Image (cartoon, grey):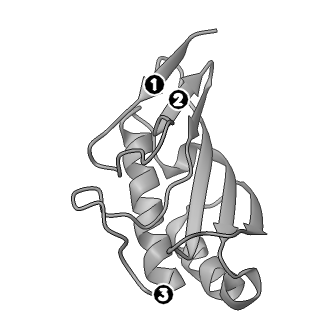
Amino acid sequence: MQSTVIHTTKAPAPGAAYSQARTAGPFLFTSGCGPIDATSGQIVGTGVTEQTQLTVANLRALLAADGLDLTDVVKVTVYLQDLDRDYDEFNRAYAELMPKPWPARTTVGADLTGILVEIDFVALRRSGT
């Protein structure tokens, strides 16, 4: 099975030893993305809605680098800094950003540093991609 590293300057550069995304067979796996501006490298937004919007935009850029879009996403993992406080607001923002039928999703609380939300995607690559 062939695997390819996916990289784009339209999403934040990795901050440690990992790739932005990798393909493996028919799937694209993204690393966790947060609300980081791809140009400045700075955290953007103070609320979970704004941070979710930028996080999904960063993931959309990774998908686009492999010719994919949000309709190709089959599994999402969401990490929220405060699950009790932020879940409802996050879910409203997510529901507006993600096309139906919604992907399978896991949402967990996590000890995130400086950000409220982190998300990773698994997408099904299109034939010939």
The image quadrant that residue 103 belongs to is: bottom right
The answer to whether residue 39 is visible is: yes
Q: Is residue 62 left or right of residue 93?
A: left
Looking at the image, the residue that sits furthest to the top is 1
Packing grade of label 2 (10 A; few <14, some 14-19, many >=20) is many
Residue 50 at what x, y percent from top left? Answer: 43, 80
Please name the amino acid that badge 1 sits on.
Val
Q: In which quadrant of the rendered image does the N terminus lie?
A: top right
Residue at horizontal 36 percent and vertical 36 percent from the top: 65
Q: Are marks 2 and 1 in contact (CB under 8 Å)?
A: yes
Residue 62 at what x, y percent from top left? Answer: 41, 43
The image quadrant that residue 67 belongs to is: top left
Label 1 vs label 3: CA separation?
32 Å
Residue 109 at what x, y percent from top left? Answer: 75, 72
Please name the amino acid that badge 2 sits on.
Arg
Residue tagged by mark 1?
5
